Image: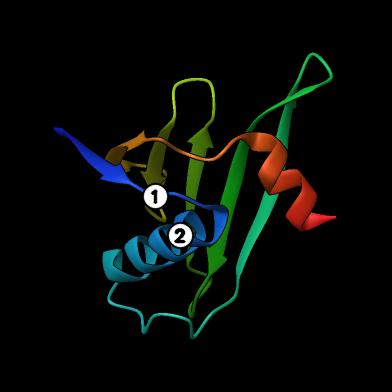
Amino acid sequence: MPTEVQRLDDVHAIRNFVNQTLCEKDQLETNSFPLYEKVLVRGGEPCGVYFYLYGPRSLCLTAIWETDSNTILFYGSRGERFRKTQLVAAPRIDDVMSLSS
């Protein structure tokens, strides 16, 4: 699976990109289902964001933004990784935490 490169300058752009990518995977209408997120913590420090979207028929699609490597890994409903995106000039994890509190 090749890695694509995206420039997403702020947290809102990342959320929109993740939502659109997950919806496209199973042909869902974008913004029809809520996108949830949770900040991941390792050793007491934030290290990423876990995104998940529940669709019809118990469908669950997920993505993980690894902030150390600035990559987003996308997973289908059976847990298979279907896409990997390298972020260029991504926002810091602190920006995510300040918007979610």
Q: Secondary structure at mark 1?
A: loop
User: Residue 85: horizontal and vertical position, in percent?
Assistant: 30, 39
Quick one: 14 or 23, which is closer to the camera?
A: 14
- Using a 10 Å C-alpha cutoff, classify the residue at mark 1 as few (fewer than 14 neighbours), some (14 to 19) or many (20 or more): some
Q: Which residue is mark 1?
A: 8
Indicate the amino acid at tag 1: Leu
Q: What colour scheme does the image use? A: rainbow
- Nearest the eye: 66 or 6: 6
Label tally = 2
In terms of image quadrants, where is residue 79? top left
What is the number of the mark on residue 13?
2
Q: Could you say where residue 83 lies in the image, as x and y percent from the top left? A: 27, 43
**Quadrant including the C terminus:** bottom right
- The outermost residue toward the top is 43
> In which image quadrant can residue 67 be found?
top right
Task: State the residue at coordinates (34%, 42%).
Answer: 80
The residue at 46%/38% (across/down) is 90
Are the two marked residues, 2 and 1, in contact with CB atoms closer than 8 angstroms? yes
Would residue 96 appear left or right of 65 to someone viewing this image?
right
Q: Earlier in the sequence, mark 2 or mark 1?
A: 1
Q: Amino acid at mark 2?
A: Ala
- Residue 56 appears anywhere in the view: yes
Identify the mark at residue 68; answer none if there is no mark. Answer: none
